[in-house]
């Protein structure tokens, strides 16, 4: 057995095969049943000519087929590639080509876009349609693909160095594929509440001895956080619950029906509509012990509201990235409005200054969060970005996350925001996350995204795109609200009000879109 997700899942399936592994709607599969299902898909991919190291794109909503696709690709040492199901034809074509995908599993409702993009991707030679009969001539229906494939294993040995790729969301540019070895990925995203395994067999033992937990990632599986939450759950021996897409009412119904113990969301964009739905009443959330936000931080006002609605639930903010893994937990009382502070889980997380040297705690020197040790290999098809982001310093390879931060005297890391999003207005730096959190504390603001727009005098002006929670507040009202807690240079000079905020399926802000709206 190796530190390879397919090896480990098979070990868990052998140890606790009768335990429930996955629930999505009315579909319920044990570990043994899911393993058999994934074996059939793996054998089909193999018969279709997919070879070790080749890439299998997955353009699906959450469900059994997505989980099986991840497992099946890894079983034959192929590489799963996550595809954003909101992408239009040009974006799909970019991703198919950039990832060099040779096979694609897709939901039939996306077929028009796929039919337009796939013929221009020369490597893409095998299509599998889920949920209906395909109209693309060369595509095969998922059920037919599995019909004659064996449910047994019989796959060649795997390696802890096998590749796993997660494409980033591309909120500021086109997405990039973050490459990991399966061993480093497993350990970088290891549940910090559990002891680290010293050998692969320890993972299976922990799953076998784990309690009857029920865990639910709310984000779509095309987002890395949901994939990592899936592996964490299975390697704890827990039952995993999905909803096909994000719908707050469906999420709370699933929590009530399946008695979910641990919930994972991605920031305010999911927490706010879920809080609205819970506040309407009628849901039993008494089973919920832990509420985790990862991939995006909860603003203080939203966190406080969730805590009032779930008084007996522990709320946690996790810090990390696709390239670094899960690295730190928010310090009690820290919020984007008051200042974000995180306590690292591991010793190889620090802040490096401009000379790429560790910042002295309490010095006030600003640098960027960095990690060494269990980090990604780099970016697929982008050696230049890899070299910039993963420099070697004094014989150690580092990841520069791009998050601007200082180190407090107690060793906690104070994160100010993403350097790529910082707004330079007259020489002063404004981090959008702080302003967004303050705006969302106004009772008439449902959601907000802050960006910079050109200004002849100051270089950039702070601009806010706001989705009201009812009647839109005036710019003057928001100005007064912001000036209570923000320095004047941080207060938005431009407001654009929208009926609905555009975000990624995982709730990440779309800053390119926000900038276009604010500049109109």
Image (cartoon, rainbow, N blue to C red):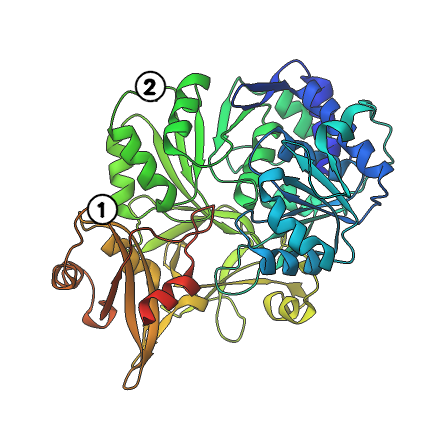
Res 505 seen here: yes
In the current view of this chain or complex, which residue is farthest to the bottom?
Answer: 457
- Residue 237 coordinates in the image, percent (x, y): 60, 23
Q: Which of these two is toward me, 410 or 273?
A: 273
In the rendered image, which quarter is residue 19 located in? top right
Instruction: Compare residues 47 and 392 and report the one nearer the observer.
Output: 47
Q: Position of residue 100 (x, y in %)?
A: 74, 56
Which label's residue is closer to the chain start, 2 or 1? 2
* Residue 406 to residue 72: above or below: below
**As displayed, is residue 496 above or below residue 343?**
below
Residue 312 point in image, percent of width and height = 30, 25
Seen in the picture, residue 247 relative to 508 is either above or below; the reply is above
**Disc 2 vs disc 1: which is toward the camera?**
1
Q: Quadrant of the C terminus?
A: bottom left
Could you tell whether 356 is left or right of 153 in the image? Answer: left
Mark 1 Cα within 10 Å, few/some/many (few <14, many 20+)? some
In x, y percent, where is residue 52?
A: 83, 45
Q: Which residue is mark 2?
A: 284
Query: Which residue position holds label 1?
Result: 469
Quarter of the image where the N terminus is located = top right
Spatial CA distance of label 2 from label 1 is 25 Å
Residue furthest top in the image: 18
- Label 1: element kind: loop
Residue 430 in view: no
Q: Is residue 106 left or right of residue 271?
A: right
| Residue visible at 87% across and 36% down in the picture | 156
Look at 34% across and 19% down and name the residue there: 286
**Residue 93, label in figure:** none
In the picture, measured across the screen, residue 66 lies left or right of residue 467, that is: right
* Residue 15 to residue 139: above or below: above
Closer to the camera in the image, 438 or 462: 462
388 vs 406, nearest the viewer: 388
């Amino acid at each position: 057995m190796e530190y390879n997700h397919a090896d480990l899942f098979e070990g868990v399936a052998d140890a606790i095969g009768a335990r429930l592994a996955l629930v999505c709607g009315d579909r319920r599969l044990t570990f043994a049943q899911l393993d058999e299902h994934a074996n059939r898909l793996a054998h089909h991919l193999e018969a279709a000519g997919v070879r070790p190291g080749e890439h299998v794109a997955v353009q699906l909503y959450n469900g059994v087929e997505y989980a099986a696709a991840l497992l099946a690709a890894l079983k034959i040492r192929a590489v799963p590639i996550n595809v954003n199901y909101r992408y239009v034809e040009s974006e799909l074509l970019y991703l198919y080509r950039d990832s060099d995908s040779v096979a694609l599993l897709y939901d039939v409702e996306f077929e028009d876009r796929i039919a337009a993009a796939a013929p221009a991707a020369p490597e893409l030679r095998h299509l599998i349609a889920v949920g209906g009969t395909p109209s693309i001539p060369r595509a095969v229906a998922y059920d037919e693909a599995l019909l004659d494939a064996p449910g047994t294993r019989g796959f060649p040995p795997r390696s802890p160095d096998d590749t796993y790729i997660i494409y980033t969301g591309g909120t500021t540019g086109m997405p990039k594929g973050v490459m990991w070895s399966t061993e480093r990925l497993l350990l970088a995203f290891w549940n910090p509440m559990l002891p680290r395994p010293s050998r692969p067999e320890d993972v299976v033992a922990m799953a076998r001895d784990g309690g009857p937990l029920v865990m639910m990632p709310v984000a779509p599986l095309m987002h890395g956080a949901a994939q990592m939450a899936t592996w964490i759950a299975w390697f704890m021996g827990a039952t995993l619950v999905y909803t096909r897409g994000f719908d707050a009412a469906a999420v709370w119904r699933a929590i009530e029906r399946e008695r979910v113990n641990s919930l994972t969301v991605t920031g305010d964009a999911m927490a706010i509509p879920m809080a609205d739905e819970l506040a309407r009443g009628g849901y039993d959330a008494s089973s919920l012990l832990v509420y985790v936000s990862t991939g995006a931080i909860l603003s203080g006002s939203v966190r406080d509201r969730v805590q009032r609605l779930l008084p007996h639930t522990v709320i946690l903010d996790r810090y990390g990235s696709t390239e670094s893994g899960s690295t730190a937990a928010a310090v009690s009382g820290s919020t984007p409005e008051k200042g974000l502070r995180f306590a690292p889980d591991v010793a190889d997380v620090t802040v490096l200054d401009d000379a790429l040297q560790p910042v002295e705690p309490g010095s006030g020197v600003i640098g960027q969060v960095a990690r060494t040790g269990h980090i990604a290999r780099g970016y697929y098809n982008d050696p230049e970005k890899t070299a910039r982001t993963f420099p070697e310093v004094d014989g150690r390879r580092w990841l520069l996350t791009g998050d601007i931060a200082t180190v407090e005297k107690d060793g906690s890391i104070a994160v100010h925001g993403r350097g790529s999003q910082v707004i330079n207005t007259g020489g002063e730096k404004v981090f959008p996350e702080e302003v967004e959190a303050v705006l969302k504390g106004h009772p008439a603001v449902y959601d907000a995204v802050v960006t910079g727009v050109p200004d002849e005098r100051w270089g950039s002006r702070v601009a806010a795109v706001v989705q009201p929670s009812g009647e839109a507040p005036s710019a003057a009202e928001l100005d007064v609200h912001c000036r209570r807690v923000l320095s004047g240079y941080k207060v938005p000079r431009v407001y654009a009000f929208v009926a609905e905020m555009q975000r990624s399926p995982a709730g990440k802000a779309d800053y390119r879109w926000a900038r276009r709206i604010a500049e109109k």
